[in-house]
Image: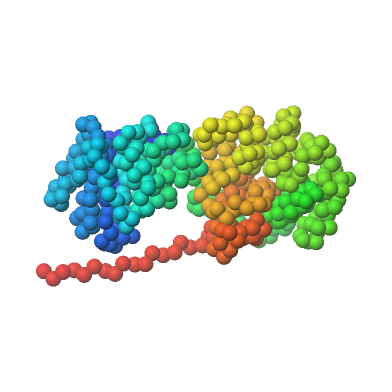
Amino acid sequence: MKILSAQQLAEADQITIEKNKVTSNDLMERIAQLIFERIHQRLQGSPVPIKIFCGIGKNGGDGLALARHMIQHGYHVTTYVTNCSKKRAPEFLFHYDKIKEVSKDWPVLLSCKEDLPEIHPQDIIVDAIFGTGINRPIDGWMADLVKHLNKTPAFKIAIDMPSGLYANTPQPADSAIIQAQHTFSFETPKLSFFLPDTGKYAGTFEVIQIGLDAEFMMKETPLAQIITPVIARSMYKPREKFSHKGDYGHVLTMAGSKGKVGAAMLTASAALNMGTGKVTAYLPQDANVILQSALPEVMTLTGKGEDYITDFEHDLKDVTLCVGPGLSTGDDVKHAFAKALSQQSKPVVIDADGLNILSANKKYWKMVTNNSILTPHDRELEQLVGKWENEYERLEKAQKLSIEKDVIIVLKGAHTIIVSGKSMYINDTGNPGMATAGSGDVLAGVIAGLLAQHYDPLTATTFGVFIHGTAGDIASQTYAHEGLKASIISNFIGAAILELFRPEPQQPQQPPQQVPNK
């Protein structure tokens, strides 16, 4: 699924109107009907008070049209208009006039000076004040209204965007923004929904296909793309019946040090769980017995160092290197890391201390093969690219590094973002329980396992991130968020692959409507 900018979506609106010979009012009527159907499906005529706040632009027109549908179906609706200017959009005026067709109670005009309207905890608030067109912070009385609505425990629904939130550009940290619990987003989600500083305002979101011009939507270059289950399913490579372990690659993990042998175990185990034919762990000497006792399926090689990997010597052929988890960063370790990189001709997965070494020793960059995959958390990313002012600058810096070094960067988070040059891919699987020690080591092993199985680097990364998140989602159904451990996530990788091919649950059929006698 594509994520387009506010400008692209505005252009899509205009092209749809021109090509399909529909009016803007027709499109808004369609939007209101679709949103009403989803709200009605949940409320089923509940008498709960609904308070719809409308601006005087197109978003307000959407709110007015929605209010009319809800009034027609017997809902207890109070409509408010933020009447702060005489510059009303024609679409707003059109739907404002149509309210009188279904109700004697006209919308309450808020002059933007009087006391703020009373809200009760049991109310449902619908926010249709500002949409994607907003380009400056909400201020004055309008900001007071937003803060007033946010203070109430009433459930808040946003139409297209929470008012005050920008779709895809930075905004001041103290901006007045509606804190929605649920957002109905038109045609595509917005980039701001997936970033930690701004995504919290959208709550859960639901994309409503409003029928924008398909040709335009297809040809537009997106800001980013969401990895959907359909896309992930298309990436999967089924196994041939007459195959053997040699067909599924060999991962060599270079990980672990005194007190951090667990990182090596998690990485190697995840590579195995992802289906790698063979996994060898390159370890300090004192880690050998620990790992072989815990993971009998994993082969081991040891360097000269007892507590740390201080050298890198092996005679393995055609391996995929995953380096960094729990590695440490001492001088001897750095030299071993550099030697390991210098011997690689295929893309490498670099995580954790591997990234710390790389950021502190810029000369090692020349040894990093093209299309290698870096998996930093934010502190490691900051060491690689420097500090950023906001999440958009973070993405820009990651893109710049990806282009300069010809690498793929995995920005780990609630919505992990994969950066490959100018392209970005957003993952929508995973949960807060995965914020646990070792989860990143598992991800590194998963991606390395897919690389070893001849997935191209970008596919290995996007598919690996999706499967990793899905494994955490399935595991959380048994262990809850608090009970998740990295090793548990790893053990649910197989279940995550099965989930790709599980049939969609069928919707219960509605009973047939009775035909009245004529």
Q: Residue, x 77% and y 49% (percent of image)? A: 256
Q: Residue, x 46% and y 61% (percent of image)? A: 504
Task: Give the side of residue 330 with respect to residue 441, left or right.
Answer: right
Colouring chosen for the image of the structure: rainbow
**Residue 236 appears in the rendering:** no
Say above or below: 509 vs 140: below
- Given residues 413 and 242, the one toward you in this image is 413
Residue 396: give x, y in percent of width and height: 54, 32
Say above or below: 80 vs 297: above
Task: Give the side of residue 52 with respect to residue 293, left or right.
Answer: left
How many numbered marks are there?
A: 0
- Given residues 134 and 264, the one toward you in this image is 134
Say above or below: 241 vs 234: below
- Given residues 128 and 176, the one toward you in this image is 176
Residue 221: give x, y in percent of width and height: 46, 35
State the quadrant of the N terminus.
top left
- Given residues 187 and 278, the one toward you in this image is 187
Q: Residue furthest right?
A: 304
Residue 472: give x, y in percent of width and height: 58, 57
Q: Residue, x 32% and y 57% (percent of image)? A: 122
Residue 263: give x, y in percent of width and height: 72, 51
Q: Residue, x 65% and y 48% (percent of image)? A: 440
Q: Residue furthest left?
A: 518
State the quadrant of the C terminus.
bottom left
**Residue 328 appears in the rendering:** yes
Q: Quadrant of residue 419?
A: top right
